[in-house]
Every structure is written in C-alpha cells, then in structure tokens.
Image (cartoon, rainbow, N blue to C red):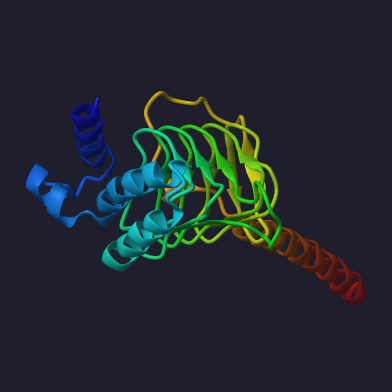
Amino acid sequence: MFWKRLREDIQVVFERDPAAKSVFEVLLCYPGLHAIWLHRVAHALYRRRLFLLARLLSHLGRFLTGIEIHPGAKIGRRFFIDHGAGVVIGETTEIGDDVTLYQGVTLGGTGKEKGKRHPTIGNNVVISAGAKILGSFTVGDNSKIGAGSVVLKPVPPNCTVVGVPGRVVVREGQRVRDAIDLRHDQIPDPVAETLNRFEAEIKALKQKLAALETRLYGEDKS
C-alpha cells in the first residue's frame, strides 16, 4: 500500500504537469510532492496526539518547500500542488481525491472560533493561483475556483467561481468529463463580460443618437 501510494503520487505529477520530464526530476524538484509526503508523516503523528512533533515536522516542511500544511488537515488521494509557493492549508481542512492547487492558494478560517473552521474541498476540484477559500463550508465536487478569487460561502458541485467575493458564474453549464480539467486559464471573467455589455449598450445608444441628429438636421434644412 505504501509503495503503491508513492507511485500514484509520482504518476499524478506526470498527468497534470506537462513540464515533468523524468522520475528523478519529479523526485528531486517538485516541492508540492515533498510537502505532501512530509504531511503524511506529520498527520500520522498528529493522530497519535504527538502534536509538538507533528508541528515541528510541518514547520520543517514549510521551510523546505514554501508550502504550509497543518498536520491536522485531512488530504485525499492523488492530491497535486503545482509550483506551490505560498500555499497555506489550515488545521481542520478536508480535501477529497483528485484535487489540484496552484501557487498562493489559502484554505483558511475567518476568525478564532473553535472546532471546524476551515473549508471542505470535494473531489476533482481545481483551485487556481492566489485563490482564498475562507471558512467552514464545502466546495462541491468537480468545481473550479478562478485565480485570485476570495470564496466566503459554499460552492455547489459542478460550478465555476470567480471574483472578490467569489460568485458562481457557471453551474452545470458543461458536461463533467472523467479527465481532470486543468484549463484554469479559460474560466470566464464576469467583470469583463459586464464591461463588454456596457460597451455594446453605449454603441447602440450612439447609433440611436446619430440617427436622431440626422433626422433633426434634415428637418431643419427643410
């Protein structure tokens, strides 16, 4: 089981990062992979209530990789952190299977409350660079969080969320494929869509004004 999980972790890197060239490169040069492996040991210590040792190991992992994963966080299989710099995962975070995180992602809380205070991430979720998911709620399966988004409330399954604060812009809008969709560069931008709509309305008003001016000038000349 142990070696199977290790092979699975390495295979995930090749599946989701086209830059990966060899097994040795993945083993030596992927801090996301190192952070996950260190977290598994730290989490095992945490479950045995060896809290100080667990925190020391997670602190070492942050120093070596730039990725901070609290040893209490629960992480599923085939988890992939691309680049990874600045990723923070809180203590009561729960992450499902086949989840992808990019650099600068925070899975955090919103205050000093006790108990479950960090998000639960479903299966096959993609969280793009710089996104912040703050609070004790669920991000549903097969959802995508756009770069730089700040998500403060639950996200239903099969949704795309963008913006500050985050809002759903696609819900059940496309067929969910078996393959993990990593095209986070194609997430729609609601601000740009609004500006485009305003531009179209202004253009239409200009055309109406020009037609009105033409009619008035024509009447004056007559």
Instruction: From the viewer's perspective, tell me whether residue 82 is left or right of residue 203.
Output: left
Residue 147 is situated, as x and y percent measured from the top left of the image, at 49, 57
Q: Does 186 appear above or below 2?
A: below
Q: Does 143 appear above or below 202?
A: above
Of 109 and 204, nearer the camera is 109
In this view of the protein, can residue 22 be seen by the observer? no
Quarter of image, res 5: top left
How many numbered discs, if any? 0
Q: In the rendered view of the protein, which quadrant contains the N terminus?
A: top left
Residue 23 is situated, as x and y percent measured from the top left of the image, at 10, 43
In this view of the protein, can residue 142 be seen by the observer? yes
Of 31 and 175, nearer the camera is 31
Of 112 and 161, nearer the camera is 112
Residue 66 is situated, as x and y percent measured from the top left of the image, at 33, 65
Instruction: From the viewer's perspective, tell me whether residue 75 is left or right of residue 193.
Output: left
Quarter of image, res 210: bottom right
Seen at 78% across and 63% down, the residue is: 205
Q: Does 166 appear above or below 120?
A: below
Q: Does 37 appear above or below 87?
A: above
Residue 206 is situated, as x and y percent measured from the top left of the image, at 75, 67
Q: In the rendered view of the protein, which quadrant contains the C terminus?
A: bottom right
Instruction: From the viewer's perspective, tell me whether residue 207 is left or right of residue 68.
Output: right
Seen at 53% across and 61% down, the residue is: 148
Of 113 and 155, nearer the camera is 113
Instruction: From the viewer's perspective, tell me whether residue 106 is left or right of residue 205.
Output: left
